[in-house]
Image (cartoon, grey):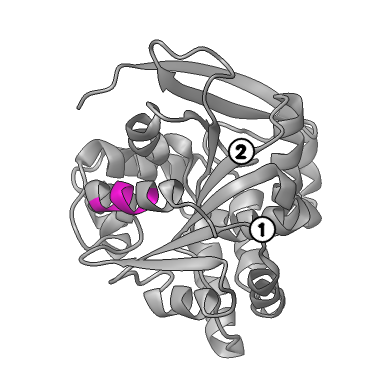
Amino acid sequence: MTVATNLNKTLISVNGVDHYCEWITTAHSKPGTKPVMVFIHGWGGSGRYWETTAQALSEDFDCLIYDLRGFGRSNLPLAVTDTGASERYELIEYAEDLCTLLDQLNLDQIYLNAHSMGGSIAVLFLNRYPERVKKAILTCSGIFEYDEKTFNAFHKFSRYVVMFRPKWLTLIPGVDKMFMARFLHRPIPRPLSQAFLEDFLLADFDAAYGTVLTSVCKEATEWLPEEFKKLTVPTLLIAGEHDQIIPAEMGRKAADLNPKVQLAILKDTAHFPMLEDPETYLQNIREFLNKVDG
């Protein structure tokens, strides 16, 4: 079934940074008549890759997509980029950004769907503001172990990748497909892969590299399992069977820490199951959301 949707795009100032926000609702929807689902994107991306999922769910939810500070269309002001203050890229700061955003929109309670690095931000938010989330979906999230040699190599490689991002890459045929190859098991429509490449090239350097350092580090391997253990909000963790970025086993280990976390591993998908197999992804979400918690 095709759902007619309304798109309402705006900029909202959150802690001194204009955040790009986009409401996706049905054409006949009136504000306040449906629950709200908020989407958090992962590293290097923007809310653009959530749009098809939000459109599919817009019959039952007013869906809010926003771009994290320093990513996508939420550009950092010069005053921030000049200082290069790394503490602004702690994931807890991004969780507080979400809290401020909800306050400014007068949203007391939401449903939350977060992907990849956004999942770590969401876990922090869920434990600090559990009363504000009815149910949560973590897509491609999990816990990992610290390996100093591997982490150091990853940080050096990531810095190089973030530094070398010429805008002309988007003009080369097939680069978007090559760029997305490691993230996918199934192909996705070219406009989606092209959009992700464009967003990666748009990301602020300090934000992109700063969040690498704070999300893939020894400290994260210590606090993230503890955060999963503390979750009280009913949570569905969806993992991609062939995910090379956050392997399904990492999701399984996270889910094993807490009975509040339900695990679903989607076959024949990798790091973007919502785009690689949207029908199965949506089926799992709807079953979870419709389930009456005992």
Going by the numbered disc 2, the residue's amino acid type is Ile
Q: Residue at x 75, y 26 (%)?
A: 104
Q: Residue 167: horizontal and vertical position, in percent?
A: 41, 39
Q: Which residue is mark 2?
A: 110
Q: Is residue 239 above or below residue 257?
A: above
The C terminus sits in image quarter: bottom right
Q: Residue 228: horizontal and vertical position, in percent?
A: 63, 70
Q: Quadrant of residue 91?
A: bottom right
SS under mark 1: helix
Q: Quadrant of residue 159?
A: bottom right
Q: Residue 57: horizontal and vertical position, in percent?
A: 38, 34
Q: Residue at x 74, y 56 (%)?
A: 92
Left or right: 73, with 96 as reference point:
left
Q: Earlier in the sequence, mark 1 or mark 2?
A: 2
Badge number at residue 210:
1
State which region is magenta: 280-285
